[in-house]
Image (cartoon, grey):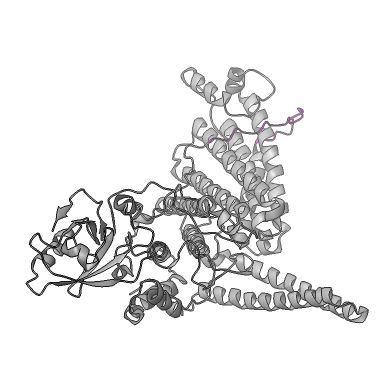
Amino acid sequence: SQQGCDPFAQTQRSKLQHRRARINQQINKEMRMRAGAENLFRATSNHKVKETVALELSYVNSNLQLLKEELEELNSSMDVYQNDSESISVPMIPLGLKETKELDLLVPLKDFISEHYGEESVLFEKEIKEFMELRQAMRTPSRNEAGLELLMEYYNQLYFLDSRFFPPTKTLGVFFHWYDSLTGVPSHQRALAFEKGSVLFNLGALHTQIGARQDRASLPGLNQAIDAFQKAAGAFNYLKENFSNAPSLDMSAASLTMLVRLMVAQVQECVFEKMTLLRAQNDFLSRLQLAQEAARVEDVYSLVHQTMSQPHVKDYVPFSWTTMVHVKSEHFKALSHYFAAIALCDCPAPSDAELLEQEKAFLQFHVTMPEGPSLSVLLQDPEERRKLGKAHLKKAIMKHEEAMRIHGLCKILRKMDILQEVLSFAHKRSLSKYSEIDHEEDFFETGEAPDIHPKTHQKPEIKSPNFSQVKVTDLFHRLGPLSVFSAKNKWYPARRVHLMRGENGFGFTLRGDSPVLIAGVIPGGCAAEAGLKEGDYIISVNGKDCKWSKHAEVVQLLKSTGKEGVDIGVITLQGSECPKAVDRKAAVMSSGSGMLKSDKENSRKSLMNSKSASTLLVWSKKSKRSKKSTYSGVPFTAVGDNEAMY
């Protein structure tokens, strides 16, 4: 039933995935050899053996280096994710999805169902298989809305899986294996949070691929690219804020900070492209605006470049990415100076009516005021305008050349003709403009043009994932309402009680819905004699399952019993001998997706003393729960004071 997922589709992308996986396997093998050699090196005191092992180690390390370079070439084959439009768009950086190993949950979940829930586990095989099929499908999502929804659906199902099968104090004993999206290094962990975090990472990565595929020569394509990169930034940011201590580098705080900034820069670049597309008029003010937009793009790419050059990130990020980001910051700086020159040289001097508005705009245009005459003189004197324009062009040309030089340093980028074309086109355009306004009789020394003040008319938004947009039903809802039947609650084995109706009824008060609670037992009444206790939950009446039954339904079943009496199945929660039912009900579920912003997914560090940095710990739910919350077709109602005697 899962749409848009063909794991066998030999598309370019899946070929890429297979090559990546193959390199991953080789890397794993080399890593194992290295670990073995290192152990031997430490253990032996024999010099001959030590020398042989040292040689073996250097061989393994150089092999690893080559494999990592091969992987980097793959991660930079951005053409796989680009669109097929004829027009030239500067390539964007998409991310590959994290790979994961298959996971067989059949035995662990069946064991848990029989041990913890006391249910016949074979009856839940269909649900377990359905869950595993969903996980299988989510490994190869299609690059469109359906793929995104699939990842969201699986993510939301993990909320239920967590509540049903992961008690706070122990794990299921299964390992979740995921590969690093950039290096292919494998990591594994028992914590479900690692699985959740990895799915969230892939949600972000899929958005980047969708963004990079758009045809940015058209307005709809640009808007879709902006939306996709904003959502990618949102997913990575959400991951950074809610998960900590991930065992893989791509999910470390430093990497995620870098990815969020990279996505924001790509949004800003699209905003600039949108402006060049929409700009019908070539007047002075709109050209100044373009120059400021370009300066803003340069600004954000410089920040990304700084982030990528930090110690923990530098050795990890593909060199081609760092170079691309550096090239873009120089390229957009050049463009900002080019548009400043065009505004000064190609636009007529202002009329008296326009002067005031142009002066005001020009006042805030440069980072520092240009040397020379006052603003009004400058703006009204064509010769002064040409002089300043020429200074801007000189700087533009220097920056174009710098961008091309950096581009030439990276052999992977050198293969990307599109980027090469864009850079050389911009360079030639500035050169020809310069020769056009350069007079032979110019005797003045071209001054240093001040930089342009960055400013944007559309600030990038970081759009957090909206989990509630994909509604899911708890696959294991037959286990009973989560308010009671969850991994964190423990209860005594179910008891079957036979009740006869006395003169005054059964002698208990009932309260609430799904499951109905015995709120009070009258001393000496039938219920008390049969051994029912306050705080018991009714789970069946005459063999009919009542876990999900409403108050009125249970009452109806009880009332319809005749002289022969009634069989009632009940459970008692451990530690709830004096129940505060309302509190328990209130803790049922948070609104929306059961994940709230205030959740620091892993705030219970003390639980495992966080011995190693690689423990992605369980999360605590610190949020105030809404008392009444319908979660995709599973209604939970607050307990009212509708106690009634029966």
**Quadrant the C terminus occupies:** bottom left
**Is 456 on the left-hand or right-hand side of 636?**
right
Q: Is residue 557 above or below residue 585?
A: below
Q: Residue furthest front?
A: 524
Residue 591 position in % (x across, y down) = 34, 51
**Is 585 on the left-hand or right-hand side of 241?**
left
Identified at 54% across, 24% down, the residue is: 349
Residue 527 found in image quarter: bottom left
Residue 98 position in % (x across, y down) = 54, 67
Magenta region: 437-455
Residue 295 found in image quarter: top right
**Quadrant the N terminus occupies:** bottom left
Q: Nearer the viewer, residue 395 or 506?
A: 506
Identified at 69% across, 44% down, the residue is: 399
Identified at 74% across, 78% down, the residue is: 33
Could one spot residue 429 in this view of the protein?
A: no
Dominant secondary-structure state across the stretch colored magenta: loop
**Is 159 on the left-hand or right-hand side of 513?**
right
Q: Nearer the viewer, residue 540 or 38?
A: 540
Q: Is residue 178 above or below residue 458?
A: below
Q: Nearer the viewer, residue 421 or 499?
A: 499
Q: Is residue 319 magenta?
A: no
Residue 297 position in % (x across, y down) = 57, 43
Q: Nearer the viewer, residue 299 or 536?
A: 536
Q: Is residue 443 magenta?
A: yes
Residue 65 found in image quarter: bottom right
**Is 4 on the left-hand or right-hand side of 582?**
right
